[in-house]
Amino acid sequence: MTSAIITRSLSKQYGDLKALDDFDLDVRQGSIFGLLGPNGAGKTTLIRILTTLMRQSSGEAFVEGLDTRSQGREIRRLIGVVPQENSLDRYLTARENLELHGRLHGMDSRLCRRRVDELLELMGLAARQKDFPDTFSGGMQRRLVVARALLHQPRVLFLDEPTTGLDPQSRRAVWDYVRSIAGDSMTIFLTTHYLEEAEQLCGRIAIMDHGRLIAQGTTQELKEPLTGGTVYEIEFGEDTERYLALLNEMACVRNVAVSGRTIQVGLERWECLSEVVSALNGAPVRRISLRERTLEDVFITLTGAEVRE
């Protein structure tokens, strides 16, 4: 399958800091690809290089076969970008912001007007199209930035945390639209801190940290290497303190964690559940359920649990 994005030994150095370190990536054409990583992992640096806003220190990067170092103008014609910041023109109305973007991309005026109408309606901004962005909420501004990036129907769409600040309904609308446009005609490259978003949208996901690629695959492929026994959630009808002590003393229990009246119990193997049930005989247990491994488990396992600046 043809590749939309390729990087080979891509590196970016800021003095003593290596923001990207021999980064290799291959994103298939027509896919929705997710890039995850803690703050400072190098995600934004990578996007800036791929969108020709920054030059790499060494290595190669190609978008739709075009070299980011020598064919920046051609790349900018065929990509769309939703940056982290709401970079709108405050002196133009919502509609004028979109129409200006269409003119800059040389769109036919009738096609541009039709696309503007479609996207304003999709993003719930049609009734406010004559208003200025400064009068919008942060979420409404974010929706307008997404609409602007989609206007000229780019070949590759870069979404750098696109749904930050959106309410659940707006986020869901963006998800649905992203799914509908992905395919042979468009590749979508997504960074997000919402792991559920990556799990819902992306066919393949890469996880990076300290400028290096540390894992890549489908959600299921990323979950498979996780070890640590089976985890069950046990919900009680009263305070869990006495049962927490009981579970901690059991040989087959690896670890426990408490959330309200629910205890997460890590077992050596799933057969140990019968021992736990016997030990809790007579306890006010409301629910026992298997806790499936999540993308968050993968992320924390690979990058650590500490908060990054």
Image: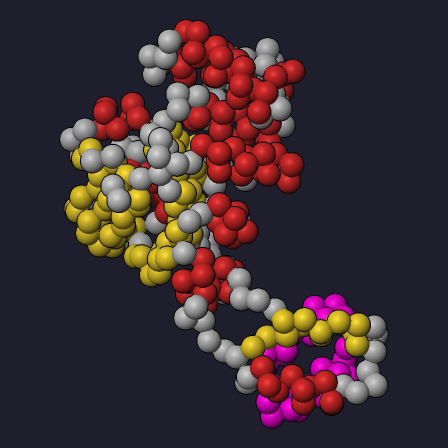
The answer to which quarter of the image holds residue 241 is bottom right
Residue occupying the point 56% across, 77% down: 230
Expressed as whole percent of the image width and height from the top left, the position of residue 186 reads 37, 33
Is 79 inside the magenta-drawn segment? Answer: no
From the viewer's perspective, tell me whether residue 6 is left or right of residue 151.
Answer: left
Expressed as whole percent of the image width and height from the top left, the position of residue 8 reads 19, 49
From the viewer's perspective, tell me whether residue 191 is left or right of residue 22.
Answer: right
Expressed as whole percent of the image width and height from the top left, the position of residue 191 reads 43, 44
Residue furthest to the top? 109
From the viewer's perspective, tell me whether residue 81 is left or right of residue 145.
Answer: left
Residue occupying the point 45% across, 57% down: 219
Classify the position of the N terminus by image quarter.
Answer: top left
Q: Is residue 41 visible?
A: no
Q: Is residue 241 visible?
A: yes
Is 261 inside the magenta-drawn segment? Answer: yes
* Placement of 4 over or under 16, stated as above or below: above
For the magenta stretch, what is the residue range? 240-267
Expressed as whole percent of the image width and height from the top left, the position of residue 208 reads 36, 56
